[in-house]
Amino acid sequence: MSLAMIAVIIGGFSLNLAAGRSSFGLPLIYHVHAFVFMGWIAIFLVQNLLIATENLRLHRKLGWIALVWVPMMVAMGMAIVLYSVRDHGGPPFFALPEFLIGNPAGLLCFGGLALSGFALRKRSDWHRRLMLCSMAAITGPGFGRLLPVPFMIPWSWTVAALIAPSIFPLIGMAVDWKRSGRVHPAWLWGLGAMAGTFLVAQAIAFSPLGETIARAVVAGTPGAERPMAARWP
């Protein structure tokens, strides 16, 4: 499942690059964001390989680097969202307020689950499931680039940010059920956190407060030229 999540993220960004929707000529902030994001993917992959090879000593040492990397992920994720909406209004097939508010909510969900997993590192059953849920929480950007989201308006954001990423915890639940006849509560907490933060973000985004925040953020920038609602590119 770890490899599947990594494949979704890398596949989504690679498809954008191959299709000419992205390039290496983007501003520096995109490259810093890519370094931090891909760095986390590398850490996540290596950590899983270390567990598979039973190298717990190195796994624990690398875990401290991962702990520092989590706030970097959250900070750079929020920075690139702000830059994107101000520079060009963000992806047109997402409503501007839901993109602006939903992304930070997802990043905070990722951070909360990852830090919870770290706090419960001595309880390996909880630790590994929470870390998998934290990774699932940030597969949205990959799904958003792989799926035909322009055809899903007005449900594009819901599909890319919640429904598709939820597949991974649901698979984990199914595996648990098949093996032991019960679902580990860590999956429920993880999926609950993903759904809860999504619903709160949506409630804010589509309220008068959400539109006020969005208009204030893009005021005086090129991003203010696009409509608040999602539209065909």
Image (cartoon, rainbow, N blue to C red):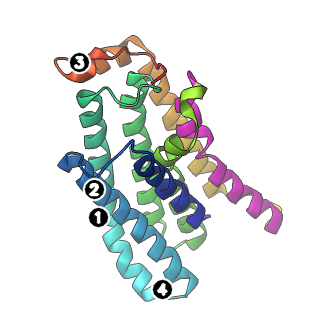
Please give the residue where the numbered disc 1 appears in the rendered image: 68
Question: How far from the left and from the top, in percent, is residue 176?
Answer: 74, 63
Q: Kindly identify the amino acid type of the residue bearing the numbered disc 1.
A: Val
**Mark 3 → mark 4, Cα distance in angstroms:** 48 Å
Classify 10 Å Cα crowding around label 3: few (below 14), some (14-19), many (20 and above).
Answer: few
* Callout in the foreground (3, 4): 3
Mark with earlier residue (4, 1): 4
Residue projecting furthest to the left? 220
Which mark sits nearer the N-terminus, 2 or 4?
4
Residue 202: image x %, image y %? 48, 25
* Residue drawn at (28%, 53%) of the image: 24
Look at the numbered disc 3 and give the secondary structure of its residue.
helix
State how far apart marks 1 and 2 are (Cα).
7 Å
Q: What residue type is labelled 3?
A: Ala
Magenta range? 153-179
- Cα distance between the residues tagged 3 and 1: 32 Å
The residue most toward the top is 208
Vertical comparison of 127 with 76: above or below: below
Residue 213 versus residue 180 in the image, above or below: above
Would residue 130 be seen by someone viewing this image from the given angle? no
Q: In this view, does 197 lie above or below 121?
A: above
Q: Pointer 3: what residue?
A: 216
- Give the residue at mark 4: 56
Q: Which numbered disc flags the more N-terminal residue, 3 or 2?
A: 2
Q: Which amino acid type is marked by label 2?
A: Met
**Which residue is the site of mark 2?**
72
> Is there CB contact under 8 Å for labels 1 and 2?
yes
| Front position in the image: 217 or 67 | 217
**In the figure, is residue 68 to the left or right of 229?**
left
